[in-house]
Amino acid sequence: MKAWEYARDLLRNAEPVLLSEEEQTWDASALIRDQDAILKLFWNSNVPGSGAPESLAVAAIQSLENKGYVVPPNQHLLDAGLAAVAASDFETLHTVHARLKAVMRQAVPDPEHPSQKTRRFKDFAEFEAAIAWPQDVAVDVHSADFADRIAAAWWGQIIGAAVGTALEGYTTEKLKAAFGTIDRYMRPPNTYNDDITFELAFLYAFEEKGYAVTSADVADRWVSLIPFAWSAEAVALENLKRGVYPPVSAEDGNPFDEWIGAQMRGAICGMVAPGRPHEAARLAWLDGEISHTSNGILGEVFNAIIVARAFVEGDFRKIVTETVALMPAETEYGAVVRFALEAAQTSNEWETAWRLCDEKYVEYNWIHAYPNAAAQVIALWFGENDFDKTLAIIGGCGHDVDCNAAQMLCAVAIAKGFASIDKRWIEPIGDELVTYMRRPAKTTTSALIAMTVEAIRKAN
């Protein structure tokens, strides 16, 4: 049936009714409150897990400038917007917000900026051709040992995210003064975060399509299962709902396309491609390009390769050195992880190495991929292949702790097996897994582990 025929039948079959006065009107006040609340979060919010302050409006300009864009004058708009938030003047805030987005659309790249002189790959084929890929190492996905490693992988992520949500958005100095060594949960842990949410969306698509899964397949799961998102993912999700699919969903109106959102999703791509770094990278790229571009996607590729390699190699100094070497030096991401690795190799302890990186990337937002990639490298280098030590370091680095800890502890747990995770991390959480997805809003970690194992075995 054609669209005009549907419309004709709607008209011809409609029977007149008389509505009550209440039924004749929209609840505009509720719509206004919802729109105001969402807009306020963009301008002035506190991270739900840690209470750290953040302004995406300020960060959007920051991110464009990080990438070497010349942004038209905007300070007056930032001042006006932040003042409007403080005064709860939402009429002004909506106007200022629209004006700020217009200004960002007028930003143009400065060819002389250092960032613009680096290489940015346009697609996976171009990236793939630039890499000397290591050989795959066979992993028996039908073995009991493999199932144990997948259990370890998910628990590593769940624990890392649960610890990190209480710590993200703060500096090493502030965290050390407040908590000392990160060797415990700072508050009762929960599983409610975005780190695992987007990996679940990938997993559902992979469960159905296996290695033939596409970016559009994963994007469909975003639209159907994820009600809201933050920064790059929020822009991409809104684009998807307008019918703008990858890779354009990551490019249109997205100043956060090199933030950590893709990097925090890499582990699942490595989990489903054990011992296969090239395949892990390919899957990470197709997942990453939903919301990120170039260096942002490389963050997901980097983590996916580390996790894939962890199934066949237990020396994380070796893994991190070899994975850093795969990131082309002419890219900004490649330069970042090389700087972090050199800082680690030339420092006696992690705090010295991290201080060098923290100073080097001070102009970047704490949610940007770069400082967090550096934290990951340092944690793996000084973590001595140990779950607790790696967690203490990555927690102590601050910044986007939950994303970093979830990804790196996934890798360490895979290499060492489920028994390497002390029960004190598992027992306070239990088996219940709560998400903010439409499905599953609530499940169990054991069910997630079983589903993952089955999906990988089916695909193989």
Image: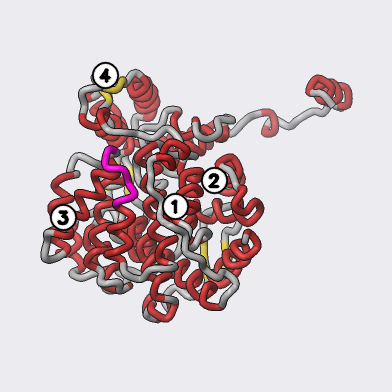
> As shown in the figure, which amino acid type bears the numbered disc 4?
Pro
Task: Say which residue appears at 51% left-offset and 43% top-offset.
Answer: 286
As for residue 413 lying within the magenta part, the answer is: no
What's the mark number on residue 210? none
Of the residues tagged 4 and 2, which is closer to the observer? 4
Of the residues tagged 2 and 1, which is closer to the observer? 1
Gap in angstroms between the C-alphas marked 2 and 1: 18 Å
Gap in angstroms between the C-alphas marked 1 and 3: 26 Å
Q: Earlier in the sequence, mark 1 or mark 4?
A: 4
Residue range in magenta is 325-330
Task: Say which residue appears at 54% left-offset and 47% top-offset.
Answer: 226
Residue 176 in picture, x, y percent from top left: 17, 64
Residue position for label 2: 227
Residue position for label 3: 343
Q: Earlier in the sequence, mark 4 or mark 2?
A: 4
Q: Main secondary structure of the magenta part?
A: loop
Asked whether 224 or 52 is in front, the reply is 224
What's the mark number on residue 265? 1
